[in-house]
Image (cartoon, rainbow, N blue to C red):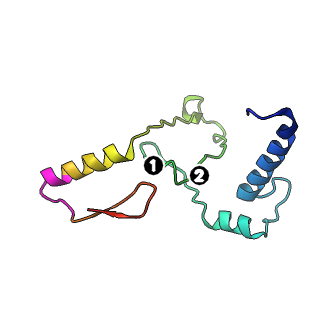
Amino acid sequence: VCLPPGQVDRYYEAYADFERLLNGDANSNEPMNDELSQYAHEFTWDHKLSPGDMLVFNNRRMLHGRRGFSAAKGTSFEDSQRHLVGCYTNIDDTLNSYRVLLRERGTAASSILNVGNGTNIIP
């Protein structure tokens, strides 16, 4: 963190508040009842991926992370490891490739929902 020394403590306090907002208070089994925490809980998607699963999302529109995990007792070291691969693509290049593939297959759509940071329909 590149902050002036006088702001470091405030940064970590805000970071801890943000963690509590998303995950509740680790020291309590009580859910947080404020409006932002309820919103975060309502719109959090928690899913365990299986080997071979792929998850694709817009990195600019989604706050994402992963939780810690513990391997089942008796699991080998190799089977207890988690392997994630990240990949980034430019949305314009991706949409262009998609349109070209649709055109080559003769299934070009009259419009494609803009999956970038806007909500426009792209002709």
Give the tally of numbered discs: 2
Give whichever of 78, 7 is nearer the camera. Answer: 7
C-alpha gap between disc 2 and disc 1: 14 Å
Residue at left offset 44%, top offset 59%: 118
Residue at left offset 60%, top offset 36%: 75
| Quadrant (top left, top right, bottom left, bottom right) of the N terminus | top right
| Labels 2 and 1: the sequence-earlier one | 1
The spot of residue 58 in percent (x, y) is 47, 51
Q: Amino acid at mark 2?
A: Leu
- What is the quadrant of residue 7 in the picture? top right
Left or right of 66? Residue 5 is right
- What is the quadrant of residue 88 in the picture? top left
What is the number of the mark on residue 63?
2
In the depicted structure, whether residue 39 falls above or below residue 70: below
Cβ atoms at labels 2 and 1 below 8 Å apart: no
The stretch of residues the image draws in magenta is 102-109
Q: Secondary structure at mark 1?
A: loop
| Quadrant (top left, top right, bottom left, bottom right) of the C terminus | bottom left
Q: Main secondary structure of the magenta part?
A: loop
The spot of residue 9 in percent (x, y) is 86, 41
The spot of residue 48 in percent (x, y) is 54, 51
Inspect the magenta stretch and tell me whether residue 30 lies in it: no
**Foreground tag (2 vs 1):** 2
Neighbour class for label 2 at 10 Å: few (<14), some, many (≥20)? few
Which residue matches tag 1? 55
Left or right of 19? Residue 92 is left
Q: Amino acid at mark 1?
A: Leu
Give whichever of 76, 55 is nearer the camera. Answer: 55
Q: Secondary structure at mark 2?
A: loop
Give whichever of 45, 14 is nearer the camera. Answer: 14
What is the number of the mark on residue 41?
none
Inspect the magenta stretch and tell me whether residue 106 lies in it: yes
